[in-house]
Image (spheres, grey):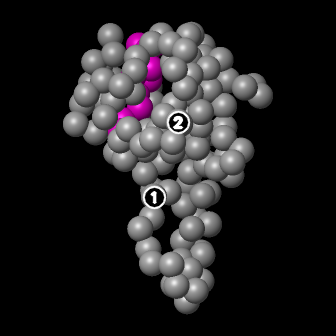
């Protein structure tokens, strides 16, 4: 059921997966297919899987809405688009040059989060605020 091919998925995104203060994977894959949400590491190892009806999610305010907190089988995970990860230097000139790109990344992250929450809601998941 959760091993559906990507072409059969209702929703699929490459995400950074975190649990608590720990990053589990920086290129994980979140898939919704056949009524099941599957969260895997980039190399394919299963992190969590559950029927969508048993999954709860909400946008994370502290991430400017560009990430989601998902509860799967009682375990809480944070997922955010890989595009929000950045490894630039910390100089003032560099920070100013990156500002426009950062704003675009946050916008993309918000769009991905809204798409994820919409797909969960449509599949029967519990989405806060819907």
In the picture, which quadrant includes the C terminus?
Answer: top right
Neighbour tally class for label 1: few under 14, some 14-19, many 20 plus, Cα within 10 Å: few
Report x, y in % for residue 74: 55, 15
Report x, y in % for residue 29: 36, 35
Number of marks in the rendered image: 2
Label ID, residue 20: 2
Q: Is residue 1 visible?
A: yes
Q: Real-space Cα distance between discs 2 and 1?
A: 17 Å
With 118 as the anchor, is 4 left or right in this view?
left
Extreme residue in the left direction: 43
**Residue 75 is covered by the magenta coloring:** no
Report x, y in % for residue 59: 66, 37
Measuring 77% from the left and 28% from the top, which residue is drawn there? 129
Label ID, residue 85: 1
In the picture, which quadrant includes the N terminus?
Answer: top left
Neighbour tally class for label 2: few under 14, some 14-19, many 20 plus, Cα within 10 Å: few
Extreme residue in the front direction: 21
With 96 as the anchor, is 10 left or right in this view?
left
Measuring 28% from the left and 39% from the top, which residue is drawn there? 42
Q: Is residue 123 above or below residue 119?
A: above
Q: Of label 2 and label 1, which has the lower sequence position?
A: 2
**Callout 1: SS:** loop
Image: magenta residue range: 28-38
Residue 34 quadrant? top left
Measuring 36% from the left and 25% from the top, which residue is drawn there? 47
């Amino acid at each position: 059921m959760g091993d559906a091919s990507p072409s059969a998925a209702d929703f699929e995104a490459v995400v950074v997966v975190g649990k608590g203060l720990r990053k589990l994977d920086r290129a994980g894959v979140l898939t919704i297919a056949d009524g099941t949400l599957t969260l895997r590491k980039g190399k394919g190892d299963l992190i969590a899987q559950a029927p969508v009806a048993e999954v709860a999610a909400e946008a994370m305010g502290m991430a400017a809405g560009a990430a989601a907190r998902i509860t799967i089988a009682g375990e809480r995970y944070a997922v955010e688009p890989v595009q929000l990860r950045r490894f630039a230097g910390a100089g003032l000139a560099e920070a100013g040059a990156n500002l426009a790109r950062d704003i675009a990344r946050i916008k993309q992250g918000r769009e991905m989060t809204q798409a994820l929450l919409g797909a969960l809601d449509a599949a029967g998941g519990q989405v806060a605020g819907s």
